[in-house]
Amino acid sequence: MSIEMDKPPVDPQNPLLELRRLTPARIALGRTGTSMPTSAQLDFQYAHAQARDAVHLPFDHMGLSSQLAERGRESLLLHSAATDRNSYLQRPDLGRKLSDESAQTLRDYALSHPGGIDLAVVVADGLSALAVHRHTLPFLARIEEQTAAEGWSLSPVILVEQGRVAVADEIGELLGAKMVVILIGERPGLSSPDSLGLYFTYNPKVGLTDAYRNCISNIRLEGLSYGMAAHRLLYLMREACRRQLSGVSLKDEAQVQTLESDNGADMKGNFLLSPSAT
């Protein structure tokens, strides 16, 4: 059951109270003597519990695989070298590589499907399986529409239990993929236990650092929309293919349609700013 804090009435003498209506940030909480009000303390404890639950929620890969099959998408279940959740949380390095059995499974698949692919699609539980459960399918639907229009070949959806970002590089290399994208549950915040992140790499291979990856984060209903995230990812993939690189050398300069644009035309830069400010 959600614990909702009472919204304070608008007070023109205290603008922070009005800001509380626009942000989930913990501002203008009030006080009781020298302490926080009980409602604010309970709300904090509830948010903290949600974050902990998101970290420890088991990855429902069977449910996700079933839903993908209903949409006609093949999936392949793999596991990182982290044998359980405790080892995953205490040994980040184990989550960055496949188990020996899973690596062999992928090699066998690659041998039976020679020729390589354009884009390997990986989904890992990361630090919030909740984010993966909620946002993977609707986001993948948008990605598949756009990659089909580009004529790019896709791998099956590779599901990885106890996976971290770098495991996608090994998967991409074993599949002979030109590009790889991993959808992964981000570390929960106190107001965002279900934030999905994606990391994109051109020419993936084992040993790459974060400098070779592009990140798009906070994909969720209250954050970056599925459509906007897919738009930005498609831009990165097109530019990566053209320039044959990714990471810090590839900037996200995707054109974004805004209400302020003349006749709905796209504009570069910060989409929060009006044309006169850019």
Image: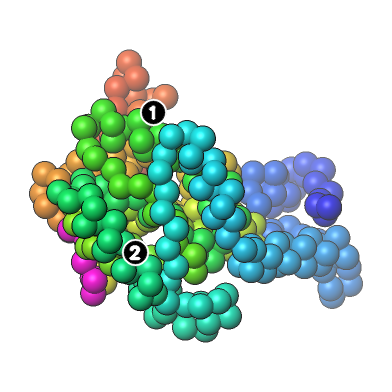
Q: Is residue 89 visible?
A: no
Please state the horizontal and vertical placement of residue 207, each as a whole percent of the image: 23, 74
Q: Which residues are magenta?
A: 201-208
- Give whichever of 276, 24 is nearer the camera: 24
**SS majority, magenta:** loop
- Quarter occupied by the C terminus: top left
**Residue 105 numbered tag:** 2
- Relative to 120, is 230 on the left or the right? right
Residue drawn at x 22%, y 63% is 173
Residue at (78% x, 41% y) in the render? 10
Q: Is residue 91 left or right of residue 148?
A: right
Residue 66 spot, x, y in % from top left: 54, 44
Q: Is residue 12 visible?
A: yes
Rendering coords of residue 22 (x, y %): 64, 44
* Quarter of image, res 268: top left
- Which element carries disc 2, helix, strand or loop? helix
**What kind of residue is marked 1?**
Thr
Report if residue 14 lies within the magenta region: no
Q: Residue at x 80, y 52 (%)?
A: 2
Amino acid beneath label 2: Thr
Q: What secondary structure is marked by label 1? A: loop
Q: Nearer the viewer, residue 114 or 198?
A: 114
- Residue tagged by mark 1? 258
- Image point (26%, 47%), residue name: 119
Front-lying residue, 71 or 213: 71
